[in-house]
Image (cartoon, rainbow, N blue to C red):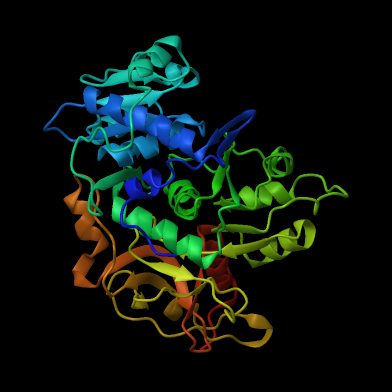
């Protein structure tokens, strides 16, 4: 599926499409209604944000209809959205909001206690589920997409500032342009055969890059619908999927394990879901998920910054996450020296024989779409340390068969492997 170049174009082309587009509880909006709502918010945005500044806005929201409406509005207006993590507190939350230099923060009443007592000079707060907010939008109800822009919109227009996990210091705000987001959506829609009749179930938080890049964007690119769960719920998952007619979802972390931990039911396979896409499920849990629910899970690996990607393709060896995406020149290197690691070797029983030599960091030595971090040149430089290319610090090894597949290790798996070395020694 070919990208049109910008997210704004993907939004505008849904004008006049009266099929269902956004489902949230009893609320159902058509594609046309979504564009109408986005156009009104874009016009409001053009009046609220100062000219000549950074056209940024922060979204401190659960997965409610306001989140995708403001994503679309920002695309139309040429603004950038910063998803604010509601699990952050106090000074950390202030730091995230101020770091994005967003003069406008959109939130909801449920999150107002998080802002109590915080000093946010120069930041205007709009609360979506209030009469004042509804009244603010009334004058813009007749806006047409393209009527209001803060800046010219093109593929290079900044669209997202989404925070990394912050596992090594304060979270960094990775930049994603409209061109990269539209391209990612079109690529995934084509790869997974997303149809206009599909419904993407978004249960992962939209303040995180996974839900926006891998769930919302491909639905937008294909003209499919989205269904929103404010926060992930394992117990509500199947009921939601059935009620919304969902065919696709994304996951990260332990979501798949939580779903497998729910009590089994005779109707576990009675649903329209056909595909899940995500990370960290693992081969064993993916097999259990398919056996129980009849749903194929496709594991992917890639930095949220866009610097490297590994795709699961037919013939990928068991346990491997996949092969390098087209155009990537991936290698496994030693973290300190940058020296390329040898392939893994296994002995009887599948024991890894040369883990101390084979395990390393993934690096992309080819061109990447990484667009940098917002106001963080030190982090930019660290990602390309020693001029090696884009570095992904997650531990991986090459499969031993020479077909270019990669096996990632999470922190738990790596700790267990190292414990095995300490107990038994590493055979030579």
Residue 332 position by quadrant: bottom left
Does residue 346 appear to the left or right of 292 in the view shown? Answer: left
Q: Position of residue 287 (x, y in %)?
A: 71, 65
Residue 361 position in % (x across, y down)? 38, 69
Find residue 333 and report its image quarter: bottom left
Residue 408 drawn above or below residue 241: below
- Residue in view at x 28 percent, y 67 percent: 368
The residue drawn where x is 31% and y is 27% is 94
Q: Position of residue 389 (x, y in %)?
A: 25, 70
Closer to us: 216 or 119: 216
Residue 46: which quarter of the image?
Answer: top left
Q: Is residue 369 left or right of residue 295?
A: left
Q: How many marks?
A: 0
Q: Is residue 240 above or below residue 46?
A: below
Residue farthest toward the left in the current orientation of the protein: 52
Q: Name the spot of residue 323 as percent of width and height, x first.
A: 47, 76
Residues 368 and 331: in front is 368
| Image height of 367 relative to 8, above or below | below
* Quadrant of the rendering where the N terminus is positioned: bottom left
**Does the rendering let one see residue 405?**
yes
Q: Residue furthest front?
A: 16
Query: In the image, what residue occupies the spot 38% across and 39% down?
Result: 72
Q: Is residue 172 visible?
A: no
Near-viewer residue (14 or 22)? 14
Left or right: 274, with 63 as reference point? right
């Amino acid at each position: 599926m070919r990208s049109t170049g910008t997210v704004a174009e993907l939004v505008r082309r849904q004008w006049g499409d009266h099929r269902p587009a956004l489902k949230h509880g009893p609320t159902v909006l058509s594609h046309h209604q979504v564009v109408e709502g986005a156009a009104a918010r874009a016009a409001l945005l053009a009046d609220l944000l100062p000219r000549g500044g950074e056209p940024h806005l922060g979204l401190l929201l659960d997965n409610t209809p306001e989140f995708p409406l403001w994503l679309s509005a920002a695309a139309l207006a040429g603004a950038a959205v910063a998803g604010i993590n509601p699990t952050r507190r106090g000074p950390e939350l202030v730091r995230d909001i101020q770091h994005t230099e967003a003069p406008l923060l959109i939130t909801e009443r449920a999150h107002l206690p998080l802002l109590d007592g915080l000093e946010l000079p120069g930041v205007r707060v709009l609360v979506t589920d209030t009469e004042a907010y509804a009244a603010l939008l009334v004058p813009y109800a007749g806006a047409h997409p393209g009527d209001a822009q803060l800046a010219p919109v093109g593929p290079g227009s900044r669209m997202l500032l989404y925070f990394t996990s912050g596992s090594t210091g304060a979270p960094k705000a990775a930049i994603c342009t409209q061109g990269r987001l539209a391209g990612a959506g079109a690529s995934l829609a084509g790869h997974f055969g997303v149809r206009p009749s599909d419904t993407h179930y978004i249960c992962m938080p939209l303040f995180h890059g996974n839900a926006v890049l891998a769930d919302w964007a491909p639905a937008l690119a294909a003209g499919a619908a989205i269904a929103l769960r404010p926060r992930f719920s394992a117990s509500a998952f199947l009921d939601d999927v059935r009620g919304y007619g969902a065919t696709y979802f994304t996951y990260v972390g332990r979501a798949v394990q939580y779903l497998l931990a729910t009590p089994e039911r005779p109707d576990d396979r009675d649903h329209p879901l056909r595909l899940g896409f995500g990370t960290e499920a693992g081969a064993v849990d993916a097999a259990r998920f398919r056996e129980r629910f009849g749903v194929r899970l496709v594991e992917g690996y890639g930095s949220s910054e866009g610097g490297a990607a590994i795709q699961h393709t037919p013939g990928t060896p068991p346990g491997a996450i996949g092969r390098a995406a087209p155009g990537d020149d991936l290698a496994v290197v030693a973290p300190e020296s940058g020296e390329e690691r040898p392939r893994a070797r296994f002995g009887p029983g599948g024991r890894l024989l040369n883990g101390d030599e084979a395990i390393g960091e993934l690096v992309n030595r080819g061109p990447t779409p990484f667009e940098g971090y917002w106001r963080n040149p030190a982090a930019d430089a660290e990602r390309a340390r020693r001029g090696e290319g884009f570095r992904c610090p997650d531990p991986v090894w090459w499969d031993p068969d020479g077909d270019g597949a990669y096996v990632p290790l999470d922190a738990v798996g790596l700790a267990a492997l190292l414990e095995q070395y300490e107990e038994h020694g590493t055979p030579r």
